[in-house]
């Protein structure tokens, strides 16, 4: 599907939406990992529920989505809340995510390079993008990734099969990231794989135990 068709389809999906959605509960539940976070990138973040939540907490945040309508909703909300939010319209199946240094108003990084301190990729399944997530982060940067699994088809006809991960597949798709926690379960009527992971290499970063949960059963690794 070409960019114009995809953009029109997503604009139509947001036709009856006027307010941002809720922030990702995976991010809000692990906010302690972002104590020293200066910059964040929300990929395919729609109307900006998560991006706005991060920006309200003093993190210089960039929201990327293919839908101009969704980005407009996010921008109006940011203006109404008197917070700064960068937005970029892009098709993440064909366009690369923005480089942090190219954006006006970015905060100084505590690391070298153009990476981000954190990124979010929620409910957008494109394996080539997942394989590159580590390269968009600074050493020690944190990634939050959510994708519905094939088990979701037991209750929901959408997303279709091509947009779903197999059980246990998601960590292996995110090359170069070390899992901090990984869960697969029913969340709010959807069966999802939820991964929190770190790009290794930060000087002086504390080791985090990996927490795994499958179907409501947890164990320490």
Image (cartoon, rainbow, N blue to C red):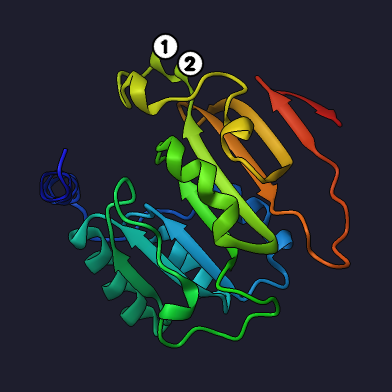
Q: Give percent across and percent down for residue 23.
A: 48, 55
Instruction: Name the residue: 37% across, 28% down.
Output: 163
Name the quarter where the C terminus is drawn.
Answer: top right
Is residue 213 positioned above or below 12 on the image?
Answer: above
Q: Give percent across and percent down for residue 123.
A: 42, 40
In the image: residue 101, left or right of residue 1: right
Q: Give percent across and percent down for residue 104.
A: 40, 86
Q: Is residue 33 visible?
A: yes
Is residue 127 positioned above or below 35 on the image?
Answer: above
Residue nearer the viewer, 50 or 173: 173
Q: In which quarter of the image is residue 47?
A: bottom left
Residue nearer the viewer, 199 or 158: 199
Disc 2: CA contacts within 10 A as few (<14), some (14-19) or many (>=20): some
Q: Can residue 50 be seen in this view?
A: no
In the image: residue 180, left or right of residue 120: right
Q: Quadrant of residue 173?
A: top right
Q: Give the labeled residue for mark 1.
A: 154
Q: Give the labeled residue for mark 2.
A: 151
């Amino acid at each position: 599907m070409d960019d114009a068709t995809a953009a029109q389809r997503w604009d139509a999906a947001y036709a009856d939406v006027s307010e941002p959605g809720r922030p990702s509960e995976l991010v809000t539940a692990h906010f302690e990992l972002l104590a020293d976070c200066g910059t964040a990138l929300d990929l395919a973040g729609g109307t900006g529920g998560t991006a706005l939540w991060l920006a309200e907490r003093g993190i210089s945040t960039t929201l990327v989505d293919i839908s101009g309508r969704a980005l407009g909703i996010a921008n109006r909300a940011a203006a109404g809340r008197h917070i700064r939010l960068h937005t970029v319209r892009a098709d993440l199946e064909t366009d690369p995510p923005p480089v942090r240094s190219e954006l006006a108003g970015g905060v100084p990084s505590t690391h070298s390079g153009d990476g981000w301190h954190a990124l979010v990729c929620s409910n957008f399944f494109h394996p080539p993008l997942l394989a590159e997530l580590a390269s968009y982060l600074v050493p020690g940067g944190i990634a939050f990734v959510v994708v519905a699994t094939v088990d979701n088809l037991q209750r929901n006809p959408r997303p279709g099969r091509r947009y779903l991960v197999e059980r246990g597949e998601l960590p292996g798709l995110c090359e170069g990231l070390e899992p901090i926690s990984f869960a697969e379960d029913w969340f709010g009527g959807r069966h999802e794989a939820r991964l929190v992971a770190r790009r290794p290499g930060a000087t002086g970063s504390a080791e985090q135990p990996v927490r795994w949960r499958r179907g409501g059963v947890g164990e320490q690794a």
